[in-house]
Every structure is written in structure tokens, then in C-alpha cells.
Image (tube, rainbow, N blue to C red):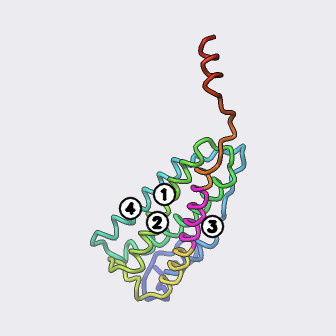
Amino acid sequence: MVKAPCNRTMQPSAGYPRTRCNWLIEHKKMPIVIYNMSRHCNFEDNIFIINMRIRVIRDLLFLDADPELFLDKTLEDVAFINKTLENLLGNLTINHRYIERDEQFHNLAETEWRFQAILYKLLNEDTVFPIKTDPQIIEPLKAITKETVERRKTLEKLCINEIDKPTAEPVVSVDELSELLKA
């Protein structure tokens, strides 16, 4: 066991002592993974899993759980969800040939909304976690909230563009369709 600078005793992890600040440091180190066309990314399943993790955090905020046990993991999950949403948006944006692209943009926008609601609760409401009194937690959460707001704006623009985009497929007239059905 190691005594952390924030007066908490924690288990060492990966060869270094863990502190409340490590979740932010690890968050910044997470690479952004861009999939190429030959690598398959199942957007629907990934978004579903992120939604489940958001629900776990939401449920945890309503329970009377021990903050000493769950604070660090919750903050790590928040950082992970943020980076994963960033990755998914980047991958979905560059993948123009994905068939269900507009549907996944909408799903991702809903997920971003849920994530932003959790961040709001963490920052502004009384929860089991003593976050309001710790600037080492508040500032990174505010930064993540800003990133979420920017992604939501981007998603809103992309969703509108996908709806307004004219289809590139040829339109068959009624006369052509009746001729095709006669044959």
C-alpha cells in the first residue's frame, strides 16, 4: 500500500503509485485509434457497450456506495468513455461508405447526451463522491465536458448534413417502374 498525496492509501498499479490525478494522466496517454477500411469496427456494439458503462456510472451516483472504493474507477471510466466516444466519432466520420452511418451518428449523439448528463451530475449535484471540493478532479471533468459539448455540436451538424444530403442513387420514374413490373 502506498500513501497518496491526496491523503488516501491506494494499491500500486503498473509499477507506480496511483493517485486521483493518474486517471487524467492515463486519459491523455490513450491513443486515438483510426480504423482503415480493411479493419472492421462494429459501431453499434461499441456504442451499446459505452451506453452500458454510462448507465453503470449513473446507477452508482444514486446508490450509497463507498467513495473510497469507487471514485478512482469511476474517474477512469469517465476518461475511457470520453476517449472512446472521440475515437468512435472520428472513425464514423471518415468511414463514408458505412451503410448505417446516419443511424450511428444519431446513436452516438444520444450517447453523448447521456454522457454529458452524467458529467453534469458529477460536477453540479451532490453525489456520493466528494468531487465538488477537489480541484484535481473538477478541472479535468470540466475539460472533458467541453470536449463532449464540442463533439455534440459536431454530431448535430453531421446528423443534419446526413438528413439533408440528396441521395446519389438514380430515381426511377413511375412510368419506368410500371414498365419494369410488366416484364
Residue at label 1? 50
Query: How far, Cα to Cα, is label 3 from label 4?
Result: 22 Å
Label located before the other in sequence (4 or 1): 1
| 3 or 2: tag closer to the N-terminus | 3
Observer-nearest residue: 91 or 152? 152
| Picture layout, residue 73 above or below residue 143 | above
Q: Looking at numbered disc 3 in the image, what kind of residue is underneath it? A: Met
Give the magenta part as a residue range: 147-160
**Residue holding disc 2:** 115
The answer for how far apart the CA atoms under marks 1 and 3 are is 16 Å
Q: Could you tell me which secondary element the residue under label 1 belongs to?
A: helix
SS of the residue at dot 4?
helix
The image shows residue 149 at horizontal and vertical percentages of: 54, 71
- Crowding near pointer 3: few (<14 within 10 Å), some, many (20+)? few
Image x and y of residue 173, in percent:
64, 28
At a point 50% along the width and 85% down the height, the residue shown is 136
Q: Nearer the viewer, mark 1 or mark 2?
A: 2
Give the residue type at disc 4. Val
